[in-house]
Image (cartoon, grey):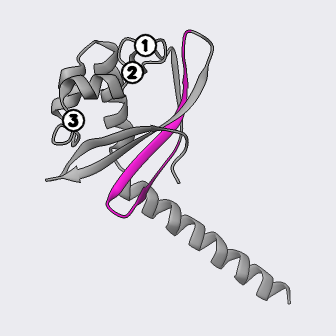
Amino acid sequence: MKKIILIALAAIGGIVVIVFAVVSLTTTGVSKKADSILTQFKNGDVEAVYNESAMKNDFTLAEFKEAMGIGSKHSIAEATKVAWTGKGFKNSEKYIYGDFKFPTGTVQTLTFYFVEDNGELKLLGILAGEPE
């Protein structure tokens, strides 16, 4: 009986390792890309983020700035602290999410969604909350 339990636990452990490896491999580069986008926002280079995104086909630069809250107290560029808490993928989209702290003391969870285009990650959108 103990052998069966040990075998079952080993199998479950193996499955967990495989799932973790798949998620890690499929989301490679997401953290680095999200950090790069945050740096660009903080440096005021919103146009570069826009031009490198998959959103430029659907939004004007002005609409993009408004959607990103540029100029508001809760603009991504104004975040004083960011703590990524998870990442994953769903269909062809990759995502990373975390908690953003703003100067007002407000903490908001934001999810950055990406799509791969010719081997390059493109920002697809940023939404409040954790991924569904």
Whichever of labels 2 and 3 marks the residue nearer the N terminus, that label is: 3
Q: Which residue is mark 1?
A: 72
Q: Is residue 92 magenta?
A: yes
Q: Amino acid at mark 3?
A: Phe
Please give the range of residues in magenta. 86-103
Q: Position of residue 127 (x, y in %)?
A: 44, 39
The residue singled out by tag 3 in the image is 59
Which residue corresponds to the image point at 31% horizontal and 61% vertical from the top-left?
92
Of the two numbered discs 1 and 3 on the same chain, state the one appearing first in sequence.
Answer: 3
Look at the numbered disc 1 and give the secondary structure of its residue: loop
* SS category of the residue bearing label 3: loop
Q: Secondary structure at mark 2?
A: loop
Q: Position of residue 125 (x, y in %)?
A: 34, 40
Is 131 located above or below residue 51 in the figure? below
Q: Which residue has dot 2 on it?
A: 69
Image quadrant in which you'd find residue 6: bottom right
